[in-house]
Amino acid sequence: MKLIRTSTVPQSLDILLKGQLKFLSENFNVIGISSKGKSLTEVNKREGIKTVAVYMERGISPFKDLIALFKLYYVFKKENPLVIHSITPKAGLLTMLAGKMAGVPIRMHTFTGLIFPTRTGVMQKLLIKMDQLLCWAATNIYPEGNGVKNDLMSFKITSKPLKVLANGNVNGIDLDFFSKEHFSTEHLLDLKEELGIQSNDFVFIFVGRLVGDKGINELVEAFSKLKTQNSKLLLVGPLETELDPLKSETLKEIETNPNIISVGFQKDVRPYFAISNALVFPSYREGFPNVVMQAGAMELPSIVSDINGCNEIIVDGENGTIIPVKNSDAVLQAMQCLIEDNDYYSKLKGNARPMIQSRYEQSVVWNALLEEYNSLISKLAN
């Protein structure tokens, strides 16, 4: 039986579904589709599945979107899959429409994050219509977490059933992989020395794209106002200048502040977690952020904004601190608290990994997804 998984960019298949596609290939003939890129080649090699490149624009581009739609339709007619399952917004819309046109019987989409709640005016109405069209074309819809589910219901995106699989995340967390035990003390000391981090520094880390809606402007502003000098801000991720670029004053602060260390994209983020004390993730919107789970597995408490996913992974005062969205003063206060209140910090740190382990172990998520596929196929047969 053929199963096709799609995402807009190959990094989503590569990072968000790491290991899952190989697991599913034990039961299905799995094909991965996304835009062309090195990550798609990596998926092909690591997961041992067939991959097909179909360029999909992340932004709205009617002409390019129409081309991608018909290319997907052609692939679906040629491969004749029983199930197609998309993640990410643009891939979801195009995959569900092309799948319906091609007569694919089971058309599944997972909403990993919603854009429209943070938009206003005409753009919000357009994005809502696009998601409504996506849901119309899909046979089954899965929000990544209860926060996403509630938003889909509140904005009346669809009247179809909304099912959250496992505890919400699309892939769970590989606790064996995300563990400090993989790194020797010597390795971590060498990395700290390379980055100019002193032994008594309190290191805050952000992992993700350096763009506005990840809260980087607020994070950098807050860090620049920290009272203590024994702190570092470690930024791990690519600087994107086209979609949602950072403010000029933020870029200048990153460049000139000696306590802000930006290392760009890193294929393996674990060593950077291992030399850090806490994750700061003041994003404006998420579905169910892997980075917060990864940080927790690496024994880091997190400061997160009160948004979907983040407020499901983090329990305020237990394994992290939840703060208001777009509030640099709240970021500053939360960072200062972790530095100054040792008892509070120790409590959060002690709870970080156990709370992730109890809810998001990877095999739980994978088996729940496999069970869902088999259930839908069984109903189709009957």
Image (cartoon, rainbow, N blue to C red):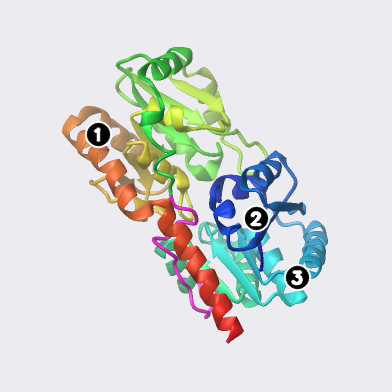
Vertical placement of residue 13 versus 145, above or below: above
Please give the residue where the numbered disc 3 appears in the rendered image: 80
Q: Nearer the viewer, mark 1 or mark 2?
A: 2
Q: CA distance from mark 1 to mark 3?
A: 56 Å
Three-letter code for the amino acid on which mark 2 is drawn: Ser
Q: How many circles with numbers are drawn on the protein?
A: 3
CB under 8 Å between callouts 1 and 2? no
Residue 320 seen from this side: no
Q: Earlier in the sequence, mark 1 or mark 3?
A: 3
Q: Earlier in the sequence, mark 1 or mark 2?
A: 2
Secondary structure found at label 2: loop
Please give the residue where the numbered disc 1 appears in the rendered image: 337
Residue at the spot 56% in from the left edge and 40% down from the top edge: 211
Three-letter code for the amino acid on which mark 3 is drawn: Asn
- On the image, the x and y values in percent for residue 35 come to 73, 50
Give the residues drawn in magenta, as a range.
154-172
Mainly helix, strand or loop, the magenta region?
A: loop
In the image, which disc is placed on residue 7?
A: 2
- On the image, the x and y values in percent for residue 337 come to 25, 34
Residue 290 seen from this side: yes
Secondary structure found at label 1: helix
